[in-house]
């Protein structure tokens, strides 16, 4: 697929993916949604990538679903039958859900670096990322409630695992804006920085740190954290035992131990 709605740069094992529709506040039309899945599916298997930074070009991170796209959904109905129309609508919703899940399912850690607007679909997207950081000028909103919609592409499922459930309910019911400092206070983001430049410097440093680790171990950590979210402690411990039974005795383990003893950075195969 030809990628036109994103800028993708890979350097020193770090992929930087940037929403690139600044004239539309980085809102996403159908093509942009489809390209996002293609980008993350590709990076998940790219051996030259160990960690991914997701950001936005221009004044905003992502303003979510392009309103023209949302309003055009009825034009895609190819039947007068209400049941057939609802089936088509359900397929569309599931498609967008699966696109966002491609970020969560990506085998590489994904760091969201948010500035400006992160509303609606944009907020849905960052909840599928492994880590989130922002600048103080960022603002967030579960905007769907003001559009007459129940948010349906992941934020109501993922965000309650991140923030206090009562506050989650408030944000979902009101759709109010909250800024970067509040996002950090409620633990939606790990930290908020005074400027976008400071944000990107901190995120870049974090990405470099992660990229220096064993890719095999990083992949295992991501899989274990996601598995634990959806399973009991006991089930997760059993899965962890099975994972390490298969993966523990690796070349990366030997290299990591040697690097620690020799006080150097480990060198790992991709």
Image (tube, rainbow, N blue to C red):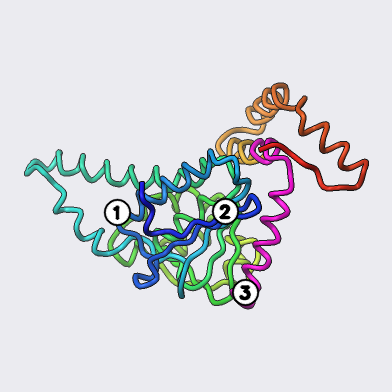
- Give the quarter of the image for residue 97: top left
Task: Say the numbered circle drawn on residue 56.
Answer: none
Tell me, yes or no, if residue 164 can be seen here: no
Q: What residue sits 65% from the left and 62% below the top?
A: 203
Furthest residue in direction right, as rendered? 261
- First in sequence: mark 1 vs mark 3: 1
Secondary structure beneath dot 1 equals: helix
Q: Which of 186 and 3 is in front in this view?
A: 3
Tell me the mark number nearer the camera, choosing from 3 and 2: 2
Asked which quadrant contains residue 143, the reply is: bottom left
Q: Where is residue 149 drawn, in percent x and y?
A: 30, 58
Residue 18 appears left or right of 201: left
Provide the residue span drawn in magenta. Answer: 193-220
Q: Does the magenta stretch include residue 218?
A: yes
Task: Please state which of the two labelled residues, at mark 2 or mark 1, is closer to the viewer.
Answer: 2
Q: Residue 10 carries which label?
A: 2
Coordinates of residue 15 in the picture (x, y in percent): 57, 53
Secondary structure beneath label 2:
strand
Residue underneath mark 1: 30
Which quadrant of the figure has residue 239?
A: top right
């Amino acid at each position: 697929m030809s990628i036109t709605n994103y800028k993708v740069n890979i350097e020193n094992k770090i992929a930087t993916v940037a929403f690139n529709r600044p004239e539309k506040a980085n809102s996403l039309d159908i093509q942009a949604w489809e390209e996002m899945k293609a980008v993350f599916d590709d990076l998940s298997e790219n051996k030259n990538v160990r960690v991914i930074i997701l950001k936005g070009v221009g004044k905003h991170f992502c303003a979510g679903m392009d309103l023209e796209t949302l309003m055009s959904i009825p034009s895609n109905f190819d039947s007068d039958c209400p049941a057939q129309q609802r089936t088509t609508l359900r397929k569309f919703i599931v498609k967008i859900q699966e696109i966002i899940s491609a970020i969560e399912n990506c085998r590489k850690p994904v760091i969201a670096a948010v500035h400006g607007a992160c509303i609606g679909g944009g907020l849905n997207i960052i909840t599928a990322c492994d880590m989130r950081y922002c600048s103080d000028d960022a603002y967030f909103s579960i905007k769907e409630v003001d559009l007459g919609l129940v948010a349906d592409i992941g934020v109501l499922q993922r965000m309650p695992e991140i923030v206090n459930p009562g506050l989650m309910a408030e944000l979902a019911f009101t759709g109010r804006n909250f800024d970067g400092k509040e996002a950090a206070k409620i633990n939606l983001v790990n930290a908020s920085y005074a400027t976008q430049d400071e944000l990107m410097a901190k995120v870049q440093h974090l990405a470099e740190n992660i990229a220096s680790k064993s890719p095999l171990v990083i992949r295992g950590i991501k899989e274990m954290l996601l598995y634990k979210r959806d399973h009991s402690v006991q089930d997760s411990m059993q899965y962890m035992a099975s994972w390490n039974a298969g993966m523990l005795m690796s070349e990366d383990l030997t290299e990591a131990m040697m690097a620690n003893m020799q006080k150097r950075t480990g060198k790992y195969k991709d």
